[in-house]
Image (spheres, rainbow, N blue to C red):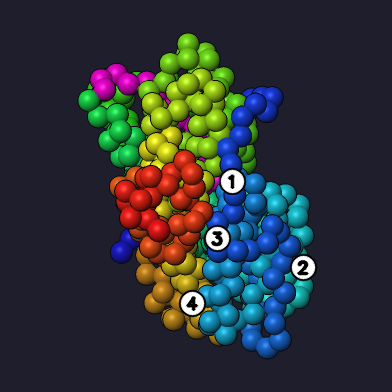
Amino acid sequence: MRIRRTALAVVSAGLAFALAACGQNAAPSTGGSTGGSTAPAAGGVKVGVILPETDSSARWEGFDKPMIEKAMRAQGLDPDIQNAQGDEQKFSTLADGMISSGVKVLVIASISSDGGSAVAAKAKAQGIPVIDYDRLNLGGTSDYYVSFDNVKVGALQGQGLAQALQGKQGAQVIEIEGAPTDNNATLFYNGQQTVLKPLYDSGALKLVQKQAIDKWDNQVGGTTFEQILTANGGQVDGVVAANDGLAGAIITVLTKNGLNGKVPVTGQDATADGLQAILRGDQYMTVFKPIQEEADATAKLAAALAKGDTAAADAVATQTTDDPKGNRQVKSVLLTPQLITKDNVKVVTDAGYVKASEICVAQTQAACTELGIK
C-alpha cells in the first residue's frame, strides 16, 4: 500500500521566554537508564541505535530503549543503544563511533532531518544500511523508515479536541505544536488540520494562535502558552498540545489560572503523567502508540539488512512514505495509533505499557476503581 505524506511548514518558535511553567515527564515502568549506552554482548551481529534525547518525552528511555534492546536480542543482534541528549554534535559523534566500530546496521531517531541525513550519508558511504526510526529524515538517504502513521496521530488529536468541544460554537483554540525541525511534528500538524481547519473555516471553532516549540521544550511550551493566553485576555476553550510533555506544561498554566479541568487539552504518547492527567480530568486525550510493535519491526528489518537480505527487509516494510525534499519514496512500516480518553485508559495498562500503580494515585484512585484499573 502506498501512503503519501506531504510536509507542510509549521510556524517556527523563535521567541525566547523566561521559564515559568513545566510539565512532569517521569519515565514509565519499562525501565531504561537516563542516557549512555547498552553495551553489546559477545557474539551476534552488531547494530547501532541512536535515540534523540530524554527531556521532551519519557518514551525514549522508558519505552523505546528497553523494547528495542529486547526485540533486537530476540533476533540474534547485539544492539549498542545510545542517546544524543538533544545535542546534534553528540548525535554525530555517536554515529561516527558506531560506524568505526563496525556496526552492520545503523538505526537513528534523529534530532533534526539535517543532522540525521548527514549521519545517514556517512553510513551509506561505508556501505552500512540505515533505518530511520520514528522520524523520517527529509532529504536523506536512509533505506527504510519505521514509525506510526503520524498524520493519523494528528488526526486523532484533532478528533479528540473536536469531540470535547462539540456544541460549543466559536470555541477558542490555542495550538502548541512540536519542533519545526522534526518532520513528525509537521505530520502531526497536518493530521490535526484535516479535522480542525474545516471547523475553523466554518466558525465552529476559532483559532487564537498556533506556535511550534523548538526542540519540543516543555518549559518553553508552557511559557509560550501562557504568553498567548495572557494576550487573549485569559480566554481559551481548548488546547492542542502535540504530546503529553507539552500538555503537562500547559496544564500547569491552566491550573495557575483556575482553568484546569475546564479546558480540554490533547496529548500523545500515553505516558504515565498524561494518563494520570486524563484520569484527573485535566487532560482530555492522548494517543497510544504501541512502541513494542515499532521496536519489533525495526529489529526484523535490522536482522534482514545485517544479512544483506533486502527481499526479507522489503517483506517487512510493505508501505512507502513520501520524502518531498528528497523527491523519493522511502520503504516504510507505518503502524496504527489509538485514541485514548478516560473511558479506555485501561487499554494502555492492560497492554502492559504503564502499570496501574503508576497512574492510580490518591487523586485518581476513584477513577481507577470506576474504570476497573488495578
Q: CA distance from mark 1 to mark 2?
A: 30 Å
Nearest-to-viewer mark from 1 and 3: 3
Is residue 253 visible in the rendered image? The answer is yes
Q: Which residue is mark 1?
A: 25
**Helix, strand, or loop for circle 4?**
helix
Residue type at numbered disc 3: Ser
Residue 141 coordinates in the image, percent (x, y): 57, 61
Q: Give how far across and how far down residue 272 sits, in percent.
A: 50, 50
Q: Is residue 177 magenta?
A: yes
Q: Could you say which disc has been placed on residue 97 in the image?
A: 2
Q: Residues within 10 Å of mark 4 (few under 14, many from 20)?
A: many
Kind of residue sitting beneath label 1? Asn
Q: Residue at x 33, y 60 (%)?
A: 2
Q: Nearer the viewer, residue 304 or 60?
A: 60
Q: Which mark is residue 29?
A: 3
Residue at the bottom extreme?
43
* Relative height, residue 118 to residue 303 (above, below): above
Residue nearer the viewer, 169 or 341: 341
Residue neighbourhood size for the residue with mark 2, other residues' Cα within 10 Å, grouped as few (<14), some (14–19), many (≥20):
few
Cα gap from disc 2 to disc 4, whole angstroms: 24 Å
Q: CA distance from mark 3 to mark 2?
A: 30 Å
Give SS at disc 1.
Answer: loop
Residue 300's tag is: 4
Q: Position of residue 15 (x, y in %)?
A: 64, 25
235 magenta-colored: no
Magenta residues span 168-186
| Residue type marked 4 | Lys
Quarter of image, res 102: bottom right
